[in-house]
Amino acid sequence: MEAQALTRPPRTRLGPVLLLALLVLSLVGFGITRALRVTDDIVNSVALSPVLEPGQAARIEFTTTEPDSRADVLITDTEDRQVRALELGVELPAGPHEYRWDGAGDDGAQAPPGEYGIRVILGEQGRDIKPPGRIRVEPGGG
């Protein structure tokens, strides 16, 4: 019986080893992504009014860490289509920025109910940034 045990190949636990390797690679990838994002975080400290109340204006605030001489600040819909240009081709210095949006589109009509975000295009730097956060326009709002 002992002779058979010596000739049998050892059992490997390849499944747990591969799972552990995949977990380690995922954590390393996440860490690299976070490190790159932190060093490349030009638009930060974003604060948006969560709901556009009827007769009010939504508050949009963010900070830029670098200036840009040809910046656009846009309101976009869920399909990333421009709804309203808050700024086009302006000098955007580094520092805090504050805007208000009354719920109207570029055509002057009130935006339909839905979720809206912001998009900051830094033309000089060739950057197109879509910060997190949404403004909800409810029926009768705007």
Image (cartoon, grey):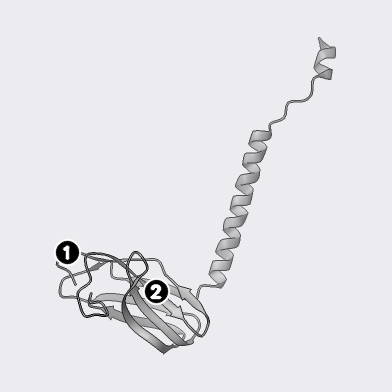
Residue depicted at x 47% and y 75%: 128
Query: In the rendering, at what x and y percent does residue 86 appear?
Result: 32, 82
Q: Residue at x 14, y 67 (%)?
A: 140
- SS class, disc 1: loop
Image mark for residue 39: none
Alpha-carbon neighbours of circle 2 within 10 Å: few (<14), some, or many (≥20)? some
Quarter holding the C terminus is bottom left
Q: Residue at x 60, y 61 (%)?
A: 32
Identify the disc placed on residue 119: 2
Spatial CA distance of label 2 from label 1 is 23 Å
Tag count? 2
Amino acid, disc 1: Pro
The image quadrant that residue 35 belongs to is bottom right
Type of the residue with mark 2: Arg
User: In front here: 91 or 66?
Assistant: 91
Look at the image and tell me in which quarter the N terminus lies: top right
Disc 2 secondary structure class: strand
Which numbered disc flags the more N-terminal residue, 2 or 1? Answer: 2
Q: Residues within 10 Å of mark 1 (few under 14, many from 20)?
A: few
State whether residue 6 is above or below residue 42. Answer: above
Q: Vertical placement of 26 versus 46: above or below?
A: above
Query: Residue 8: percent from the left, percent from the top?
Result: 80, 19
Q: Residue at x 32, y 71 (%)?
A: 48
Image quadrant in which you'd find residue 75: bottom left
Check the image and report above or below for 25 versus 74. above
- Image position, residue 129 (x, y; %): 45, 73
Q: Residue 12 placed where, x, y %? A: 72, 30
Q: Which residue is mark 1?
A: 139
Taking the image as shown, residue 22 lies to the left or right of residue 74, namely right
Q: In the figure, is residue 36 to the left or right of 8?
A: left
The part of the image, by quadrant, that contains residue 19 is top right
| Farthest top residue in view | 1
